[in-house]
Amino acid sequence: MFIRRDFVAFYKQTILGPVWIFIQPLLTSLVFVLVFNRLAGLSTDQLPPIMFYLAGVSCWTFFADCLTKTSETFIANALLYEKVYFPRLITPLSVVASSMIRLLFQLALFACLWVWYVVQGVIVPGWALLAAPLLVILLAAMSLGVGLIFASATNKYRDLRFLLQFGIPLLMFATPVFYPLSMVSEKARMVLNINPLAPVFEAFRATTLGVGDVSLPGLAWSTTFAILMMVIGVSIFHRVERTFIDTI
């Protein structure tokens, strides 16, 4: 029911409706091709620019949407929480589920272009492609865990919402969304890999497009971070949900 509500509320009274699921990442990727590839001359690791950017944009949109909407759980559902009791964790889980459905539609577009380039011989598929769903789950876990922490904190400190809105775009520059790690120096790469998102994005391109830096220590760090955030986030969320009505 919550997933259906998210879709209806988001696309109601729009001309194109759910078609925006495809238009948004495609237009963003085309802008990235023009700005970062054509004008700035950033490398795409000899991959078709549209595929390089579409992979990064789709994953980033999924992560950012999950994090932003999960962080607003208590504020967005306060009136509903006052009227009826149900496990509160259902609402942030439904946000992640609905965002994942959008991602699946966007990856369907990605798959169509992928098949075209495979037929052309530009992209060589491999068995590593089977690991891509695990990377999406890892992104979902990270966004959910961090989102729950922010949801619990913004219940009392509302200005943390502005910190998140300001921080997410900045975080994108520290994540290989529109550039590959291969174009930065070894020292800068070590710094960027502190960001737990960086190994996941590089691995996603490597598994789907066949080019990228798969760092097993980096993925181990990302997995550890995701589990840690989930444990902390769920624990704090359950503690805050008992008394949040008094402070909301």
Image (tube, rainbow, N blue to C red):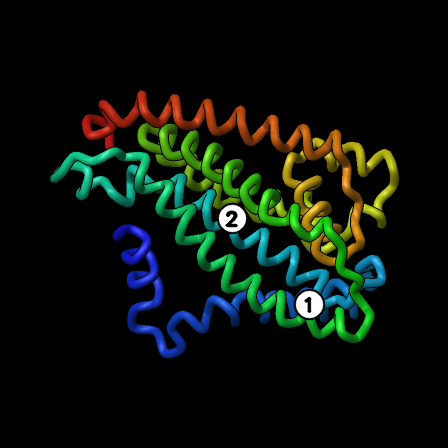
Q: Residue at x 45, y 73 (%)?
A: 19
Q: Position of residue 209 (x, y in %)?
A: 74, 58
| Type of the residue with mark 2 | Ala
Task: Read off the residue under disc 2.
Answer: 64
Q: Position of residue 216 (x, y in %)?
A: 75, 33
Kindly give the residue lying farthest to the left in the view shown. 83
| Type of the residue with mark 1 | Trp
The answer to whether 125 appears left or right of 183 in the picture is: left
Which secondary structure lies at badge 1?
Answer: helix
Picture layout, residue 61 above or below residue 156: below
* Front position among marks 2 and 1: 1
Circle 1: is it few (<14), some (14-19), or many (20+) Cα within 10 Å?
Answer: many
Task: Read off the residue under disc 1.
Answer: 114
Residue 214, quarter of the rendered image = top right
Q: Residue at x 70, y 31 (%)?
A: 194
Q: Position of residue 155 (x, y in %)?
A: 32, 31
Q: CA distance from mark 2 to mark 1?
A: 24 Å
The answer to whether 1 appears left or right of 60 in the picture is: left
Q: Nearer the viewer, residue 2 or 39?
A: 2
Which secondary structure lies at badge 2?
Answer: helix
Q: Residue at x 69, y 67 (%)?
A: 114
Considering the image in quadrants, where does the C terminus appear?
top left
Q: Is residue 167 visible?
A: no
Q: Position of residue 86 (x, y in %)?
A: 20, 35
Q: Is residue 54 visible?
A: yes
Picture layout, residue 56 above or below residue 190: below
Q: Nearer the viewer, residue 208 or 42?
A: 208
